[in-house]
């Protein structure tokens, strides 16, 4: 392997190795926990913020599921909390409903599954797993969190504005999002949404540039690219996707700000609204959709790839087997990453764009199913003849694979333009992306927390609670999202406040099913408090962790139980092998960590170890 | 139903509480310090996966069979069966893959659960196997893509010459329609001419506008191609006809179109569904604001002879609004169509 050999010779910064980071710098509380430059602390900041946002996002979804599942329920009892969101009859106001779904989507996609997921695990694991003292730039990394924090504050504040938060759907298509006359959420709420996203993009870029630089430049001696754990590969490609696609969202957002506040006509043309013909002409509403989805589709993979990386690592560790087809896994991450940039217009098959474009994007979209299929099959092959330990993390990883398959398969319907004609913007789409990107990524997030909790906090989480949390969430998520396929096939549009006015004679079709789904959704949301309890309780009262509780191979488990700033007290360990030497024939343990030289394991060495 | 739901809540709460307490007590009594991987929990989780799988498959198959008539809409356009054949073929393929992969995965989870006496097999790759499961999906996908594109090009391609042309305009929160009238040509329109009466902005300086009419409901003939020329006044809307399997966005500033051949009259559909109030409706399928959920418009499909009769009985817009037109003539006297004739 010519590539890996040349990379092996890469010089390592010698000064790094001599720098002793074990002393704690006498930091004050503020520099240690608030404006910290330690990647581990920043990771925890992202995690806690992500958890906060996930609770908000989940609570919002419970509210609109009440409206969909129990449309006659009088919510006056909730008026102390959500008072001015209710109509005099005690129901959720139709515009508030739209605001709820918009904020739910925005929060979950960006604040939880982008910042909360990548922010936590890329930050936490990249230096630890490649063998670096910290990120390439601790300062920019700190800025990344605080830009995210500012963005969070602005987005959170927007919920409480007079006209309510943005309510044009998380995709904020103009003209709806551009014209305050069109919906009240397009006033101040939308302005704040756009400003918040601008800060969010800055944060995402600072983070991603750091991840990329760290992976390329700060790998420890012997850590060739093809000795990196799949987690790192996934975070690396995710960061590249972010750097290339988020700026496009920024331009889309800036043009929208111009249209809203400075009278330009990038997206607006020939509009008559609120009794007045606007002077805007020559703009294109479709342009925004192209720009938005140029980020939006890679964003889907920004959300799912880190979870796939985390899962790869956990499935191998807990099956006590090397991940099946490591190289194929790496190439498929790249394949997915590259293809994710050329499939965006499958969100726009019936937007009015030229049908020929639809043909092109159908072909490109369905091609992306191939690397995805490879990943799914390789996970299953990894389980084959393993010795599987069902830790909560492992359960969530298997749950992820299950969701990835079921949600991925429905992509074959939506990606095929002609089938999409009838399914577009129906509940089928809602089912599809909530399973493949929502549930699957969330499960990756949970798996990661359960698996690396001992490294983050030096204590173990309660396994039994973890099992209960998993089974309720896994079954619950399927009960919530699987039935939506049927509602979608029946042609029920998404983003409908109510179906009482929908097609005569079809009101009754899914009342029971919608009630059932809402019930499952609220129960599943409630079950997350088991996790929260377990998380915070274990942080202080959990069983003390050993330094390598899962008997894993990767470098983070060679650090002390609670690593200080700088991660390793002495020198950074050198890497001598790939991270998947589990259950090697003739080896006395069923795992050989990456820092163990081949010379110490003569009995189990294989000819191909020289090139791995 | 409510009692049933309540029971589930109570039971699950009790179950969760008992589970947590018993595990705490067990942990205290056993004083487990080190992590022992092989225990009853591992078997429980492995087995639960299999049970979950069996129950879900039965549930899915039962619901899909039992509720078929509820979620599968009757088809009312000539291209609908073509889409549905592809849809159900895709369903057959994906459902098979779904079932097989999930069975294999949860079965492996059970079969290869941890056992102290066993060691996992070191099996890092198998290129042949990987090539097989790369190539087979690729071939299947090529088939689905090819099939899909042939149909896509047909359905989205240009409408036949003899298609009935109808303009459909979406606005918050209703639809309007305009027929070209006896001259079979839709008159020009301009969004700056829109007002409370002239809601689609018909430009009467174009002589072909004069016979255009705007009915309360859209009538279309069975068995004849119909093309909707779609516009939007304010924000994006979407013309969605679920029974026709037809959909197209309505975009302000960018006219779009869709065409189809209705294959069942409203009357026939009323008999088929057993619902005497049945009506085809354009439903809005792109989020457009407060009343998005109730933005709809009735479409009546009739036999061709009825359609012709109906069309001949319609009054043109200016016949219905003579004052508006005379004002228009007054204000635009230099370039009014009538004078040009």
Image: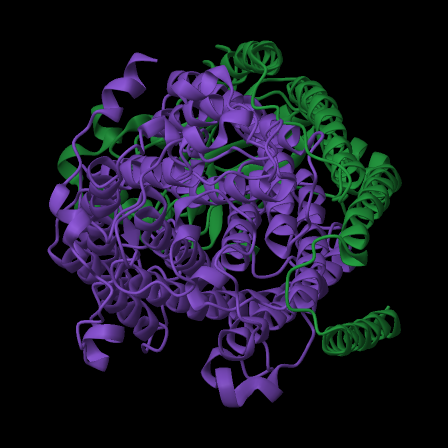
Q: How many marks?
A: 0
Residue A423, above or below B331:
above
Position in image of residue A354 (x %, y %):
37, 21
Q: Could you say which is closer to the camera, residue A345 or residue B321? A: A345
Among the chains pictured, the one given green colouring is: B
Please tell me which residue is depicted at 35% across the width and 78% down the height of the picture.
A160
The answer to which image quadrant residue A392 occupies is bottom right
Quarter that holds the C terminus of chain A: top left
Q: Coloring scheme of the render?
A: by chain
Q: Colour of chain A?
A: purple
Answer whether residue A66 is visible to the viewer in this image: yes
What percent of the width, then of the height, locates residue A148?
Answer: 26, 62
Question: Is B138 on the left-hand or right-hand side of B114?
Answer: left
Residue B259 at least partly seen: no
Residue depicted at x 27% and y 55%: A570
Front one among A220 and A472: A220
Give the side of residue B152 with respect to residue B331, left or right: right
Q: Quadrant of the N terminus of chain A?
A: top left
Identity of the residue drawn at 59% across and 68% down = A531
Position of B308 with respect to A520 (left or right) is: left
> Can you tell which quarter of the image residue A373 is in?
top right
Q: What residue is rendered at 47% in x and 65% in y? A: A54
Q: Position of residue B43 (x, y in %)?
A: 81, 51
Q: Is residue B257 above or below residue B276?
A: above
């Amino acid at each position: 392997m010519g590539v890996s050999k040349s990379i092996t010779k890469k010089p390592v910064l010698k000064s790094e190795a001599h720098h002793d980071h074990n002393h704690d710098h006498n930091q004050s509380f503020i520099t240690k926990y608030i404006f910290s430059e330690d990647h581990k602390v920043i990771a925890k900041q992202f995690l806690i913020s992500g958890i906060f946002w996930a609770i908000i996002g989940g609570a919002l979804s419970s509210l609109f599921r009440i409206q969909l599942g129990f449309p006659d329920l009088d919510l006056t009892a909730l008026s102390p909390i959500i008072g001015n969101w209710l109509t005099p009859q005690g129901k959720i106001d139709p515009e508030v409903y739209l605001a709820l779904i918009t904020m739910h989507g925005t929060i979950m996609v960006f604040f939880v599954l982008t910042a909360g997921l990548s922010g936590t695990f890329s930050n936490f694991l990249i230096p630890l797993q490649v063998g670096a003292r910290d990120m390439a730039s601790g300062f920019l990394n700190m800025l990344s969190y605080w830009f995210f924090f500012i963005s969070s504050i602005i987005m959170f504040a927007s919920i409480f504005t007079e006209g309510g938060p943005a309510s044009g759907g998380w995709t904020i298509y103009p003209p709806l999002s551009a014209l305050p006359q069109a919906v009240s959420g397009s006033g101040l709420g939308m302005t704040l949404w756009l400003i918040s996203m601008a800060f969010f993009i800055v944060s995402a870029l600072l983070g991603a540039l750091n991840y990329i630089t760290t992976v390329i430049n700060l790998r420890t001696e012997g850590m060739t690219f093809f000795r990196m754990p799949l987690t790192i590969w996934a975070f690396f490609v995710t960061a590249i996707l972010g750097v290339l696609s988020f700026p496009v969202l920024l331009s889309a957002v800036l043009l929208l700000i111009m249209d809203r506040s400075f009278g330009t006509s990038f997206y607006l043309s020939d509009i008559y609204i609120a009794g007045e013909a606007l002077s805007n002409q020559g703009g294109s509403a479709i342009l925004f959709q192209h720009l938005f989805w140029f980020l939006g589709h890679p964003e889907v993979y920004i959300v799912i790839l880190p979870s796939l990386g985390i899962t790869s690592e956990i499935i191998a560790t807990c099956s006590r087997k090397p991940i099946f087809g490591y190289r194929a896994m790496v190439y498929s991450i790249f394949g997915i990453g590259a293809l994710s940039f050329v499939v965006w217009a499958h969100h726009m098959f019936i937007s009015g764009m030229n049908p020929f474009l639809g043909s092109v994007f159908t072909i490109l979209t369905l091609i992306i199913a191939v690397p995805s299929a490879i990943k799914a099959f390789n996970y299953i092959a990894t389980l084959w003849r393993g010795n599987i330990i069902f830790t909560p993390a492992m359960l969530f990883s298997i749950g992820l694979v299950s969701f990835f398959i079921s949600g991925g398969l429905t992509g074959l319907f939506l990606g095929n333009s002609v089938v999409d004609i009838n399914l577009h913007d129906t509940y089928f789409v809602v089912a599809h992306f909530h399973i493949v990107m929502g549930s699957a990524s969330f499960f990756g997030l949970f798996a990661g927390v359960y698996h690396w909790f001992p490294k983050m906090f030096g204590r173990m989480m309660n396994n039994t609670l973890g099992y209960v949390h998993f089974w309720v969430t896994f079954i619950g998520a399927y009960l919530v999202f699987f039935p939506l396929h049927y509602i979608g096939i029946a042609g029920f549009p998404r983003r409908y406040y109510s179906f009482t006015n929908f097609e005569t004679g079809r009101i009754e079709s899914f009342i029971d099913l919608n009630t059932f789904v809402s019930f499952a959704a609220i129960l599943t949301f409630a079950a997350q408090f088991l996790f929260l309890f377990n998380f915070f309780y274990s942080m202080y009262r959990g069983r003390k962790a050993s330094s390598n509780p899962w008997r894993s191979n990767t470098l983070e488990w060679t650090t002390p139980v609670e690593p200080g700033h700088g991660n390793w007290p002495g020198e950074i360990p050198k890497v001598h092998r790939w991270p998947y030497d589990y259950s090697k024939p003739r080896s006395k343990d069923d795992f050989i960590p990456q820092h163990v030289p081949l010379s110490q394991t003569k009995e189990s060495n294989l000819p191909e170890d020289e090139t791995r | 139903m409510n009692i049933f739901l309540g029971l589930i809540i109570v039971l699950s709460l009790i179950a969760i509480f008992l589970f947590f307490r018993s595990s705490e007590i067990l942990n205290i009594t056993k004083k487990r310090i080190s992590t022992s991987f092989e225990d009853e929990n591992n078997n429980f989780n492995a087995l639960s996966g299999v049970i979950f799988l069996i129950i879900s498959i039965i549930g899915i198959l039962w619901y899909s069979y039992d509720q078929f008539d509820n979620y599968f809409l009757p088809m009312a356009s000539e291209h609908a069966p073509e889409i549905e054949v592809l849809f159900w073929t895709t369903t057959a393929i994906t459902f098979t893959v779904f079932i097989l992969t999930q069975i294999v995965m949860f079965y492996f989870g059970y079969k290869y659960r941890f056992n102290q006496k066993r060691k996992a097999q070191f099996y890092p790759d198998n290129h042949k196997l990987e090539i097989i499961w790369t190539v087979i999906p690729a071939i299947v996908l090529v088939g689905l893509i090819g099939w899909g594109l042939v149909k896509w090009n047909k359905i989205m391609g240009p409408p036949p010459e003899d298609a009935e042309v109808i303009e459909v305009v979406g606005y918050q929160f209703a639809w309007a329609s305009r027929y070209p009238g006896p001259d079979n040509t839709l008159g020009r329109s301009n969004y700056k001419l829109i007002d409370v009466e002239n809601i689609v902005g018909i430009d009467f300086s174009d002589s072909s506008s004069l016979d255009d009419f705007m009915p309360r409901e859209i009538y279309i003939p069975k068995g004849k191609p119909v093309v909707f020329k779609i516009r939007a006044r304010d924000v994006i809307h979407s013309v969605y006809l679920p029974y026709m399997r037809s959909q197209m966005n309505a975009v302000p500033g960018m006219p779009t179109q869709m065409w189809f051949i209705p294959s069942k009259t409203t009357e026939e559909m009323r008999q088929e569904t057993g619902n005497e109030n049945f009506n085809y409706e354009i439903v809005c399928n792109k989020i457009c604001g407060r009343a998005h959920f109730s933005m709809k418009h009735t479409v009546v499909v009739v036999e061709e002879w009825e359609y012709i009769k109906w069309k001949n009985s319609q009054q043109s817009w200016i016949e219905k609004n003579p004052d508006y037109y005379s004002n228009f003539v007054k204000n635009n006297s230099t370039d009014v169509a009538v004078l040009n004739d």
